[in-house]
Amino acid sequence: MMIQIGVDIGGSHISAAKIKLGNRTSDCYDVHEADVDTFGDQESIISDWTKIIKKAAGNAKEFQVGIAMPGPYDYQQGVSLIKDQGKMASLYQQSVKNLLAESLEIHPSNLVFTNDAEAFLIGESFAGAGRAFQNSIGITLGTGLGSAIKVLNVVKDAKLWTAPFRDGIAEDYLGTAWFKNFALTKFGLEIEGVKDLISPEFDPEVSHQVFTSFGKAFGEFLFPYLSRLHSEGVVLGGKISLAADYFLPSTQSHLETMGYSVPFTISELGEKAALIGACLPFYTE
């Protein structure tokens, strides 16, 4: 049986692992990761990615590779449409699928690309925190805002980070930058991110106010999408989700006020979710 390698590629990072999929179960082992300078030339980027994927593949000559990749991308063709972001600029309009297949010495048909937010929700829905939901929203909270929507067996990138919200867009209010700005403007405090707010040395009263404001904004933002899509639950991932106990009460309180209360589940697979989700196209029961 051909082995499968799950890969998660970001603007400055790659992780890859062997993935074994079973009946609603998954196993992830031989994990390898590295930082990659994606501001470099095409050859260097492909070479750095290849090294990590080959490490995960070990001695296997034939293998399938599922790649979770941020957009914009032509995922079907494996062509990068990322430009004006600095990162991966040298790959713009290139067939990353063909370049990687050649570098890995495998057939292009053994490579599939999935949007990273979709891969997260697909992985969690298959073998993690989203298993119980037919209809759900997957949200990753971190430096940026990732989002995907699942209706029955179809998962799509929701691209909600650019959705109009309050005086700007969603990502202005639902990421690390918001925490830093809010702590500075309201309390005159400089913080690195959420980790500072939950440290024992931090003033718990200030921390509570920050998380309550964030939680309310999160509920306010989610409500129209949850109600419109008849979502049964929200699957949360990303670094900020690790502080969910601090902000979810005010999120749920807002949703209850609006008459739409749903369960929130925190990612069970963590950073492995996207690796697993990226390999699901190869899975046959």
Image (cartoon, rainbow, N blue to C red):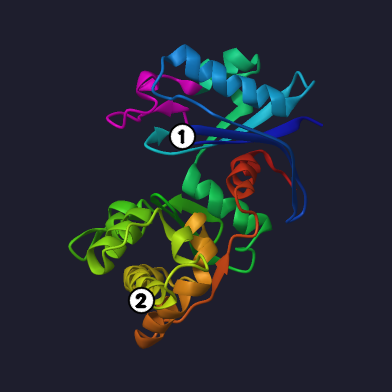
Residue at far right of view: 1
Callout 1: helix, strand or loop? loop
Q: x%, y% of residue 131? A: 64, 64
| Label 1 to label 2: alpha-carbon separation | 41 Å
Residue 237 in view (yes/no): yes
* Figure check: 152 above or below 78: below
Whether label 1 touches label 2, CB < 8 Å: no
In front of the other: 227 or 42: 42
Q: Nearer the viewer, mark 1 or mark 2?
A: 2
Residue 234 in view (yes/no): no
Q: Is residue 64 left or right of residue 223?
A: right
| Among numbered discs 1 and 2, the one appearing first in the sequence | 1
In front of the other: 15 or 112: 15
Q: x%, y% of residue 124? A: 61, 56
Q: Which residues are magenta?
A: 75-96
Mark identifier at residue 209:
2
Q: Is residue 273 left or right of residue 198?
A: right
In front of the other: 149 or 154: 149
Callout 2: helix, strand or loop? helix
Task: Tell whether position 45 is magenta.
Answer: no
For image coordinates 44% across by 65% down, the residue present is 197
Mark identifier at residue 75:
1
For image coordinates 62% across by 42% down, the residue present is 275
Q: Is residue 13 left or right of residue 180?
A: right
Three-letter residue code for mark 1: Tyr
- Chief SS of the magenta region: loop
Q: Residues within 10 Å of mark 1 (few under 14, many from 20)?
A: some
Q: Residues within 10 Å of mark 2 (few under 14, many from 20)?
A: few
* Quadrant where the N terminus is found in the figure: top right
Q: x%, y% of residue 58? A: 77, 24
For image coordinates 65% across by 14% down, the residue present is 105
